[in-house]
Image: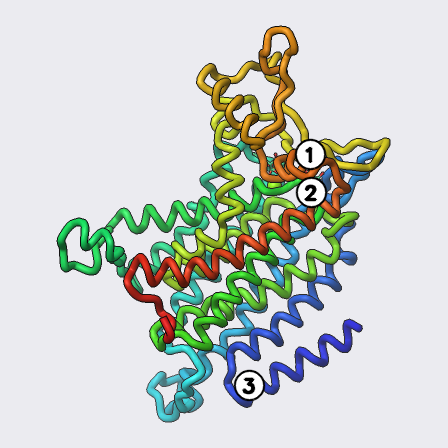
Amino acid sequence: MLKLLVLLAAFTLIHASRHYSPIIAALGFSLIGFTVTDWMIPRVSSAFVKIGCFGKDLSKPGKPVIPETIGAISATVYLFIMFFYIPFLFYKYLVVLTSGGGQRDVSVMETANDHLFPHGKLSEYLSAVLCLESTVLLGIADDLFDLRWRHKFFLPAVAAIPLLVVYYVDFGVTYVLIPEFIRKLCGTSKTTVDLGALYYIYMAAMAIFCPNSINILAGVNGLEVGQSIILSAIFLINDFIYLLIGTEASKESHLFSAILIIPFLGVSLGLWKWNRWPAKVFVGDTYCYFAGMVFSVVGILGHFSKTTLLFFLPQIFNFAYSCPQLFKLVPCPRHRMPRFNEPDGLMYPSRANLVEDPPKGIMIPILKVLYKIKLIDLDLDEKTGAIKNCSNMTLINLVLVWFGPMREDKLCRTILTLQFVVGLLAVVARHMIGSLVFGHDNLHFL
Ligand code: UD1
Ligand code: MG
């Protein structure tokens, strides 16, 4: 089977190099990414355990120990793929002949091809790869040293420095479009506003948000990789809409997005095979940061960061919903993943004890309102009406509050289905709201 996939990948790449199609090359590299990741994981996992990279699967009888940080394999395979991918993207600018003697003067250059990227895009591409490399480096540091939340939360912004610096010297555009209704409201004819330094803060905030939001929607076998696979699918659906019926200007950024995401999908599917229920490996924070950074890089460099955030709606909801616990207004245990009940093998919402560690006063009426509208489960004292405990405030626990206890694999599937449906609605909303808010969309028929 593996040999067949490699053969198919090689054939696809040869085809791509003849026809200069980056998308076909991306498919070839994606197949290679899947095959290499899938081949390597069982072979190197025990080495991870030997150096202490392992974790207890808390939702299984006996809490077995399995290798952790295995997402580092997918990430490394992805980075190497991105290096080998360069000639398939920027081939036309490779100098094939100079006057010799180490001279750099160009005598013959490969002829231009419409399907490939202009040379200027190479620095953007390399800045993306650099940014992902530093993300993986910092992610591994987190997995090895188990950093504190208040420190690791900002790590992705540090990892994004290469991206922001190259953006500054290479592109540097910090203008954003003003929505039509705001233009009308302010009576201005200006269509753009320059955000200056604020734009860089906004990009750094995106780089912090995407990786962290994936990392906190976790704790169920397969969910970290699963949500990244669904996000990839949603991004690709949006990209192909633009590639098929988009304006010329929008095509380049969506082609760029697709060529970064297709190989990412390959390495993630390879990891999913080993991380899905019952998990044989854990992905580690390395993968969560890396995956989140792939999407923020694509959104930032493709200049569709608002659309990126729209596709992150389930993660945004989970983050907003988690805020009372993240900011310690409600006690936050180290793990908020659902509770595994060994006798029936099902997952139940995990709970925060509010008797030992009472929430801040302002939160009590808020928790009661959330309870009324079925956005949380509370255990109330029958006599006094005081809150004894509440379900931990994550989307995962909320799904269990809504749909009742279920097995871990079904819980993961339910969340991923919900995410996919929301993602599809977001794609539709993007093209309807985009044309309503900005007066136009980048599609030909709108
Ligand atoms: C985040 C969440 C935490 C959640 C954890 C699960 C916040 C603020 N933090 O913390 O609530 O419990 O992710 O990853 O929301 N594990 C399993 N089964 C799985 C995945 C993980 O049992 O399917 C356990 C393993 O013991 C593993 C550990 O979770 O070793 C990994 O936790 P880690 O990624 O270090 O937690 P955080 O990212 O800090
Ligand atoms: Mg984690």
User: Does residue 338 sit above or below 75 in this rendering?
Assistant: above
Query: Could you say which is closer to the camera, residue 172 or residue 223?
Result: 223
Identify whether 117 is placed above or below 215: below
Task: Give me the residue at 53% from left, 74% from top.
Answer: 85
What separation in Å lies between label 1 and label 2 (alpha carbons)? 8 Å
Q: Circle 1 is placed at which residue position?
A: 338
Q: Secondary structure at mark 1?
A: loop
Query: How many marks overall?
Result: 3
N-terminal label among 1 and 2: 2
In the image, what residue type sits under mark 3? Ser
Pick the front one: 199 or 339: 339
Q: What's the distance in space between the residues labelled 2 and 3, CA to CA?
A: 41 Å
Which residue is denoted by mark 3 in the rendering? 17
Residue 405 visible? The answer is yes
- Circle 1: is it few (<14), some (14-19), or many (20+) Cα within 10 Å? many
Where in the figure is residue 257, as x and y percent of width and height?
47, 66
Q: Are marks 2 and 3 in contact (CB under 8 Å)?
A: no
Q: Residue 371's image quarter?
A: top right
Q: Residues within 10 Å of mark 2 (few under 14, many from 20)?
A: many
Q: Name which residue lies at 48% across and 68% down.
A: 239
Mark 3 Cα shell of 10 Å, populated few (<14), some (14-19), many (≥20): some
Q: Is residue 138 left or right of residue 254?
A: right
Asked if disc 1 and disc 2 are in contact, CB closer than 8 Å, the reply is yes
Mark 2 beta carbon near ligand 1 (under 8 Å): yes
Q: Please tell me which residue lies in front, 254 or 107.
A: 254
In the rendered image, which residue does mark 2 sit on? Answer: 220
Q: Is residue 84 above or below residue 425?
A: below
